[in-house]
Amino acid sequence: MSYYVGIDIGGTYVKYGVIDNLGKLVESGKIPTRYESEALLTDLKKITKTYQQTYSIIGVGVSTPGIINDEGYMQTAGAIKGFIGIQLADLLSTELGLPVHVESDGKAAAAAEKWIGNAKHEANFVCLTLGTAVGGAIYINHQLYRGLGGLAGEFGLSLVGRSKSYKEEAAARYSGVVAGLCRNYSIKVQERVLEAEEIFRRRDNGDKIAADCIAEFYHDVALLVVNVAVTVAPDVILIGGGISANEAVIEAIQSAYQEICQSYSTLGLIQMPRLLPCSLHNHAGMIGAVYLLKQAHS
């Protein structure tokens, strides 16, 4: 039986695994992300070659931060600055002697949900991934819409404020888990806190600042959802990223979304997209990258 290697490069960890032809994750692991490009490339090659010793690997799907054009050129690369300006898929394919497909993390997550997740039966949907920052993807008529240079769905770059400090006013600075929630809380308490779980723990222990920051985060995510809803008007908007595994968080975002829709009289008159969690959580990136590889070579 033939298998694929799926790799998801995140801001903290590189998650990876062996995936079969139906999208089942056979085994998986993770290592800390190394931001130096040569070191990271060495890790990606080692992961694949190690699996080749046990499995018949026929291709590699890679999910990574960044905006990637139709030719596979890395226009941006998140924290992996050394990847900017390279053809990552071609480079890895040459090194490994295997087909390789590289896609942005938001688009890979959406593809996974389309393949075997909560968007399997949806023709038109948007996926919002809340992680270090905010990623996303748009599906129209069952097809991933990449837009000019792969820019479509990069909702975290949208500007939500009026000042000219543009990076500070990007949606990712409000609705991202680390760039938004953790950054906001860290500023207010004058302490570097980079784990959302710690902020939730402090809230549960009576920390009012933590409670206020979390409430602000829910409202900011709901505002982003509303903006996506009235811009794209999909049937469904999925919330992805590791935080999507927390049912209480999803319910709080849904509640904030409904509150805005009910309070804003015009939105209360029209049909608005349903808001659902992604089902594949932290495995979505690697599974979706493999699905897009399969589509590219079918």
Image: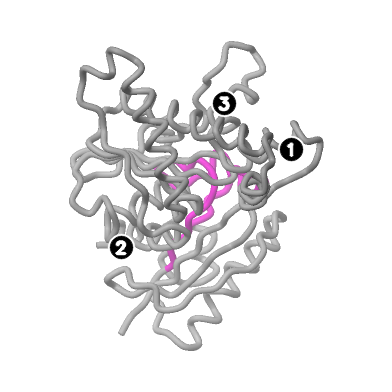
Q: Secondary structure at mark 2?
A: helix
- Foreground residue among 191 and 69: 191
Can the viewer see residue 181?
Answer: yes
Q: Secondary structure at mark 1?
A: helix
Dot 3 amino acid type: Ala
Please identify the quadrant where the C terminus is shown.
bottom left
Can you say whether 239 is above or below 43 in the image? above
Dot 2 amino acid type: Lys
| Alpha-carbon span between mark 2 and mark 1 | 42 Å
- Say left or right for 259 vs 202: left
Can you say whether 64 is above or below 183 in the image? below
Q: According to the image, label 3 marks what residue?
A: 170
Q: Of the residues under marks 1 and 3, which one precedes in the sequence? A: 3
| Alpha-carbon span between mark 3 and mark 2 | 34 Å
Residue 14 screen position, x and y as percent: 59, 62
Q: According to the image, label 2 marks what residue?
A: 294
The residue lying at 63 percent from left, 68 percent from top is 31
The residue lying at 64 percent from left, 44 percent from top is 203
**Residue 210: numbered disc:** none
- Foreground residue among 168 and 7: 168
Q: Nearer the viewer, mark 3 or mark 2?
A: 3
Q: Nearer the viewer, mark 2 or mark 1?
A: 1
Q: Of the residues under marks 3 and 2, which one precedes in the sequence? A: 3
Q: Which residues are drawn in magenta?
A: 60-89
- Say left or right for 268 vs 284: left
The residue lying at 58 percent from left, 54 percent from top is 10
Q: According to the image, label 1 marks what residue?
A: 186
Circle 1 residues within 10 Å: few <14, some 14–19, many ≥20: some
Can you say whether 7 is above or below 271 in the image? below
